[in-house]
Image: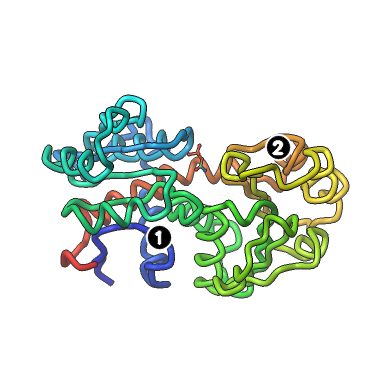
Amino acid sequence: MIWSKKHILDIASLSRDEISMILETASGLKEISERPIKKVPTLRGKTVVLFFMEPSTRTRISFDIAAKRLSADSISIAASSSSIIKGETLIDTARNIEAMRPDIIVIRHSSAGAPHLLAQNLSVSIVNAGDGMHAHPTQALLDMMTVKEIKKDFTNLKVAIIGDIAHSRVARSNIIGFSRMGANVTIAGPPTMIPAGIEALGTTIAKNVDEAIEDADVIMMLRIQKERQKSFLMPSEREYAVRFGLNRSRLQRIRSDALILHPGPINRGIEIAPEAADGPHSIILDQVTNGVALRMAVFYLLAGGIRNADSD
Ligand code: CP
């Protein structure tokens, strides 16, 4: 297969073969980060702009390290240091960045659709690093990579995604991604945090958290996205931890080979107990490690790799 996409905007626009190609490319690039000299010249002379209009630890640093490991030049811009705070529109700011001839712009934005808007209006490659409640494609891809390393195959894998589904771009991207690869995805959480019609993405809704995690091969816990909720949709965090968290009691009832994931940032003691976050089932830090390789693969395919056309 030859890579032909110009942008990575969401999981929905990636075929099963394209997802497999990204995961295989990432697996091949992963060992570079284990070398004493963690750098290859593959993207020397290429420029990547990291345009982050929302806070980020993992995603921004991961994209930055990924670019540097491939010898691309990377430049970071934050909302607070861009001319957007002086009244310039997103498109005008992006067009000015494009005029400096970067090869890829990675954007995180609080508004759903912002990366698609840039893709429609610019000719540079765009990578979505999270847009509002819509999509976080590289997070879902690194989650799939991390699960595949251990479980080998997605077919009929039982994936449970638990928590604030309504406000989670990670949940949407993972539901689409895992189900496209053949897994059975179940969700659970407070009824106020389960959006109407979510089943259309390729998931079923469990009666409660216990039903969702019973027999699950993969348990993905989500943070309550307070910054996106107009009002807190649970009486208290303590009640949330008891009714919906992966607490000590639930941890004792999961499968012995179940994997626990969390995209981060975690709220310890609320959606996930420390025993679950730090225990033997947890692959949370493996997700972060794989994030670098996954984003190296994205840069490689978009900017340097085996792309045959400016399609999409
Ligand atoms: N998973 C994730 O997007 O984390 P950050 O917000 O720290 O980038």
Of 35 and 220, the residue lying toward us: 220
**Disc marking residue 10:** 1
Badge 1 vs badge 2, beta-carbon distance below 8 Å: no
Of 211 and 72, the residue lying toward us: 211
- Residue under label 2, please give it: 278
Residue 64 appears in which quarter of the rendering?
top left
* Residue 223 screen position, x and y as percent: 64, 44
Secondary structure type for disc 2: helix
Closer to the eye: label 1 or 2: 1
Instruction: Give above or below for 18 relative to 126.
Output: below
Secondary structure type for disc 1: loop
**The N terminus lies in quadrant:** bottom left
Judged left or right of residue 23, residue 264 is right
Q: Kindly identify the residue that appears in the image at 31 percent across and 25 percent down.
A: 81
Instruction: Give above or below for 155 relative to 120.
Output: below
**The C terminus lies in quadrant:** bottom left
Q: Kindly identify the residue that appears in the image at 76 percent across and 63 percent down.
A: 212
Q: Tag 1: residue type?
A: Asp
Which of the two labelled residues, at mark 1 and mark 2, occupies the earlier sequence position?
1
* Residue 43 screen position, x and y as percent: 20, 43
Residue 34 appears in which quarter of the rendering?
top left
Do we see residue 243 in this rendering?
yes
Q: Kindly identify the residue that appears in the image at 68 percent across and 36 percent down.
A: 267
* Residue 136 screen position, x and y as percent: 46, 52
